[in-house]
Amino acid sequence: MSGPLLSRRTLVVGGALLVGAGLREAALPGAARAAGAAGLPGSLARHPRIDAWIRIGPDGGVTVLTGKSELGQGLRTALIQVAAEELGLAPETLALVTSDTALTPDEGYTAGSHSMQDSATAIRHAAAAARAALAEAAGRRLGLDPAGLSVRGGAVLAPDGRRLPVRDLVAEAALAVAAPAEAPLRDPAAYAVVGRALPRVDIPAKVAGGPAFIQDFRAPGMVHARVVRPPRAGARLADLDAASVAARPGVIRVHRDGDFLAVVAAREYDAVTAMRALAGAARWEGGARLPDPATLFDALAELPAERTLIHEAGADAPAPAGRTVRARYRRHYQMHASIGPSCAVAEFDGTHLTVRSHAQGMFPLRQAIAEMLGLAEARVRCIHHEGSGCYGHNGADDAAADAALLARALPGRPVRVQHTREQEHLWEPYGAAMLTDVSATLDAGGRIAAWDYTVRSPTHLTRPPRAGQLLPARSLAQPFAAPPPKALPQPEGGGDRNAIPLYRLPKARVTHDFVTAMPLRVSALRSLGAYMNVFSIESFLDELAEAAGADPVAFRLAHLDDARARAVVEEAAGRFGWGRALPRGRGAGFAFARYKNLAAYCALAVEVEVARESGRVRLVRAHAAVDAGQVINPHGIRDQIEGGVIQAMSWTLYEAVRFDADGLRSRDWSTYPIARFPDVPDRLDVHLLDRPGAPFLGAGEVAQGPTAAAIANAVRQAAGVRLRELPLRPEHVKAALGA
Amino acid sequence: MREAQHADDAMISLTVNGRSHRVEAAPETPLLYVLRDDLGLDGAKFGCGLGQCGACTVVVDGRAVLSCLTPVAVLEGRAVTTVEGLGSPEAPGPLQAAFIAENAAQCGYCIAGMVMRAHALLSANPHPDEAEIRAAMALNLCRCGTHMRILAAIRRAAARRIAGAAP
């Protein structure tokens, strides 16, 4: 923030809104400071041109572009707010185009709580640069110093009252250039749109039946397809009576390519009934045997793994004397379990393929589909449409691949593929089963002197861009093999995400055992390994506090140096009323994490009730304190945290994928129960610690881990039992209670 | 073309959102497909096809019904209401407005079903207490964890009814 240019522009380009702002150098945005040090900020580094992000039409209409997608997290609203703020425009006047390989920048996946950090940061700077370019153009026109002009309401305003509409400046404003490293950002102290609880722009259509989802997309001549998957992974299609199904009324085609099987009909319900007939007409052989669930964790402990030491501190210090505590934690396979099964629409015109999908990454999907079909990437366009919430890598990419294969077989006809509930449950890639082992030594003062932690996990990333990562591509007559799974490197990590505690640990080792085998198909589920690592670390912190005879919150604070971490811990504890006595059968629990140790901070205090007869645990109330940096939309963050707490509560109390050696058994909502309305807490309060001017920190996944640990810690207090396996099953509670 | 192929299709009269329709469909066709594909009413969603999640909930003669399981033939002479019958994105009805005011959707895939189940509840019981709301909504699943917002929206709509009914 050294440049006088920036402060001058910040003062004058913003015009009347920013009178006096230039006097507050110290309050200037941290993001801009970071930009000056590290080149262009956020995704601008990959796509530096202003018009990659902001385009102005001949009519002066502004379109904002993002390579990220709306997944139900409120992304559209937040990005519009950021652009509107910098452009001095009313939010409702902006158009927003989300991930589309023909139109938008390539920002990879919409994942990892990166959208605000990457895309909103890029849009903020590009919009500020666009505003400056408009002022420059107007300055030339009016013969005035652009520094004296302001941009507001779709026009550039001069101090003498002259006004030039943006549409008159479009041809002259230099937007087809790289954004400057230090864009003239508005002063956060003067924000009028960012930081406001602007209502979500997409909700009216969703509550009133407007077209909102890929499932609602229609094209002239569109036909309906259903796929038939094998009874278990790896089974081969031994025999098929295709003719009986092809002869059914309304059936356009029975499509078989190797073991990939589908039926296409003009009308949707005909496709549904034909799919059932086709399933009955197919005979499958073989397939992979699954591990015995009774010995799942013993087997996981024995699977081959690649070992990486991801953190070491005080290696040369001698092993401290003192009391050593050890624990092992376990997590079962869990699923995304989207409410709407995956869907896609594809059309092939003989040369070009268009795929409409709710997958998280249109550019990686394009690459994978192009490889699968042997088409040049330039001949494949992938366009994101909203689907049901995905919470990671669910069946969306596979549905897109199904649709692409069928569209190629039926040129000129848009093909809509809709998966069934069973297919979504049985074939989505799950969140991995995991094991952690931790030991720590307490010194005489009750502080942690040494820490040793190992997380053992299969991969958390089997997404495209490779064709072999698309389920149907593995079944074709010319199949694509699944690529060997890879670990995600630190600092973000995969299975080892959040495996390194943020606490002060003088002597510490953290090891990642990356299990290369994958008995069940797994991939990214909201927060990846962080859910399990934070559960383990934060449960163990309580075990150590108990061993030290310390209060859990005080014990955490005694090991936390980060001021923002301390602030959320104190806020959550204070709002909850930590330390107050609770009725019999109830207990309080606490947990904290900073997502990936580099995104948002979250501390959570909860109260649970344990029914001694049934062992059932109920979350009674929760207070979350969150620091996500500069808040763009407080309700957006609140809703992500509320949703994260309730979803993670459901994972933690109810969810484990059922299977036996012969196959998967969680095929619907009765065999994979999730939380329902009577299960959700009486109260759930989210407290935001806003940091005006600080960089945006992703908050979409930060609540997952703390929720699991806070509940387990509260169960310990309520019922006197320490549960170290996720989910916290009632039978384990009951057994531990000796009921 | 498709008529010729469907010997078992029948003409079925339906009243949806106060309008009469005649559709040609096999009698066992679930109402959901007729609403979405024949009448272009996309509010009701396919979630499971098993009657387990509530995404397809509509109201028939005042009661919440799962359209994914209800054969269209049994609806002759009965009044079907879908979320489109309560208002539009531009002019939402009071219950829909309450959902908008409370940000009561994340992905929103379950929301039309939530609105319709809440509509049936408030029609039968204009002043439900919290336990009654939760019990009535128990069949409808939300995966984003929007439950607290949805409950707030239903309370808001109920309170508005009380306020509206006051002299």
Image (cartoon, helix red, strand yellow):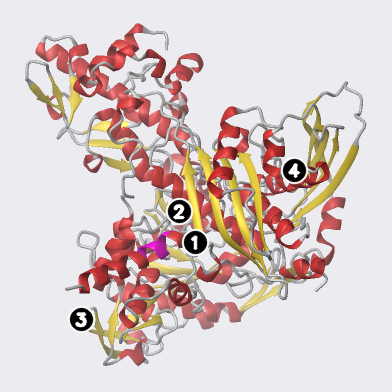
Q: Which mark is residue B18?
A: 3
Badge number at residue A342: 1
Residue A71 point in image, percent of width and height: 44, 51
The quarter holding residue A22 reads top left
The residue segment tinted magenta is: B149-153
Report the disc number at residue A541.
4
The residue located at (53%, 46%) in the rendering is: A575
* x, y percent for residue B89: 25, 60
- Looking at numbered disc 2 in the image, what kind of residue is underneath it? His
Instruction: Give the crowd class for mark 2: few <14, some 14-19, many >=20 residues within 10 Å.
Output: many
| Chief secondary structure of the magenta portion | helix
Give the mark, 1 or 4, whose residue is nearer the N terminus: 1
A296 lies left or right of B98: right
Tag in front: 2 or 4: 4
Nearer the observer, A518 or A367: A518
Which residue is label 2 attached to?
A: A358
- Tell me which residue sits at (45%, 27%) in the image: A694
**3 and 2 marks in contact (CB < 8 Å):** no
Q: Residue at x 36, y 19 (%)?
A: A178
What's the residue type where badge 1 is placed?
Ser
Are the residues at dot 1 and dot 2 in contact (C-beta closer than 8 Å)?
yes
Query: Can you give x and y, in whole percent of width and height, for residue A369 in the image?
Result: 52, 49
Residue type, numbered disc 4 = Leu
